[in-house]
Each structure stands twice: as structure tokens, then as C-alpha cells.
Image (spheres, rainbow, N blue to C red):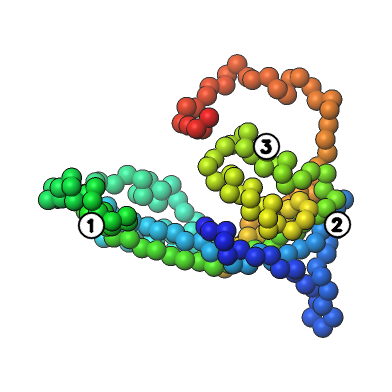
Amino acid sequence: MSTKTITFRQAFSGWVFKHAREEQIGDYNVNFYLVEGMKLVSRKRREHLTADDIKKNKSFMQSLASGAAVGDEDFKSLQHRKSLAPPGRMPTTWEEYVGAAPGAAPPLGRAQILKQNEKQFTALIGMSEDFPMGVEVLLDILEIVAPFKHLEKLRRFCEARLPPGFPVRVEIPLLPTISAKVTFQKLQFVSNLSDKLFYVPTSYREDPTRFPDL
């Protein structure tokens, strides 16, 4: 998802006498903005799938989108499949491969079957300047807990374009009839926490694949 086209516009309420949309969420006064220009681009490669695999995948996703119940057998059929026979050796030389133009490298295996989908949507964000924590503090916490290479890009985006305040509510459409909503109703800083909350249980075992970059 690119952030270059994203813009924020004041959200309004009312049919005849429109006014800037404001609400009270918890203890905070919140101003709402429309987040426009969001475009999600997804690319799917299918050359490693059989025609039957593609049909099953499509049926499975349609069931999820319609809200139909999905049983364990449906998951098992998607997870355990026989692999296709390996492709024949391509006559590509090393010189041809390293000398190819950027983005036009010759195939070394099966020819790519690529499907690209673009979806544009508008989100809703509620900003409050009464919230006791700023966005920059949240970004600092994220940088410590889960560092990733796009965090600096997110930081620049928030500093340059995000309306003033903290995003107390974020509502993003997932499907035509389903939206994800996150709301911060209360934040309280406490200094008298028990030390027991910070003890690592003796039964804890670290998964080395969970956070490979840490």
C-alpha cells in the first residue's frame, strides 16, 4: 500500500445543516476525518497451482466473504496437496540472467501466472487532542517492540499528514458489509504496578521463528 495518494478530509454530519462530525468517546472529544486515496494492491502467483487448486481456493474465499461456516476439512484440503511435477530446465544462461533489464529477468522455472487486484477504499479516523499520549510515543513503542523497515516511513507519514491529536478511533472497511473498528476509550498511566507482572513464567519457551529480526 502506498501512502503517497492518501489525504485527510474533515468528516461532516447532518443532511441539511451539515457540521463537522464530533463525538465524545470515553473522556475525550474526538474530531473525525475521512481517509481518502487508500489503495491496496495485491498480487497472486498461480503457476504452482493446478486448475483444481485454483477452483478450491476460489470456492474457499467466496465462502469466507459470504460469512458461511468453514469446517476443519476445508482447511485440511487447502493445506495438504500434492506438488506439481518440477518444471524442465530452462536454457537461460548466467550472462542472460545478470544482464537482463530491471524487472525483466528471464524465468528460471515455470512461466509466471500473475493476477493483480487493486482495491480503493475510504477509512474513517477519529482524532483527539485530549488523549494523554501522542502518536510519536506510540511509534517509539512500536520501534522497540516490533521493529520493521517501514516504521520510519510510517513515522514520516504521521508527522507530515496526520491531523492533530491521537487516533482514538480507526474504522477500515474489509468487505462491502464488514468493517474493522479499533477504539481507545481510556488510557491511564499507573506507577504502582506489581513486580509480579514483569516476571517471565518458568514454563515460557521462546519461539525463534516468532520475531526473527530481534
For label 1, the SS is loop
Disc 2 marks a residue whose amino acid type is Asn
> N-terminal of the two: label 1 or label 3?
1
For label 3, the SS is helix
Determine the residue positioned at 44% across, 59% down.
Answer: 42
Q: Residue furthest bottom?
A: 16
Q: Label 3: which residue?
A: 141
CA separation in Å, label 1 and label 3: 43 Å
For label 2, the SS is strand
CA separation in Å, label 1 and label 2: 56 Å
> N-terminal of the two: label 2 or label 3?
2
Disc 1 marks a residue whose amino acid type is Ala
Circle 3 residues within 10 Å: few <14, some 14–19, many ≥20: few
Determine the residue positioned at 64% across, 47% down.
Answer: 155
User: Is residue 147 rendered to the left or right of residue 87?
Assistant: right
Determine the residue positioned at 71% across, 60% down.
Answer: 125
Q: Label 1: which residue?
A: 111
The answer to whether residue 61 shows anywhere in this view is yes
- Disc number placed over residue 29 in the picture, else none: 2
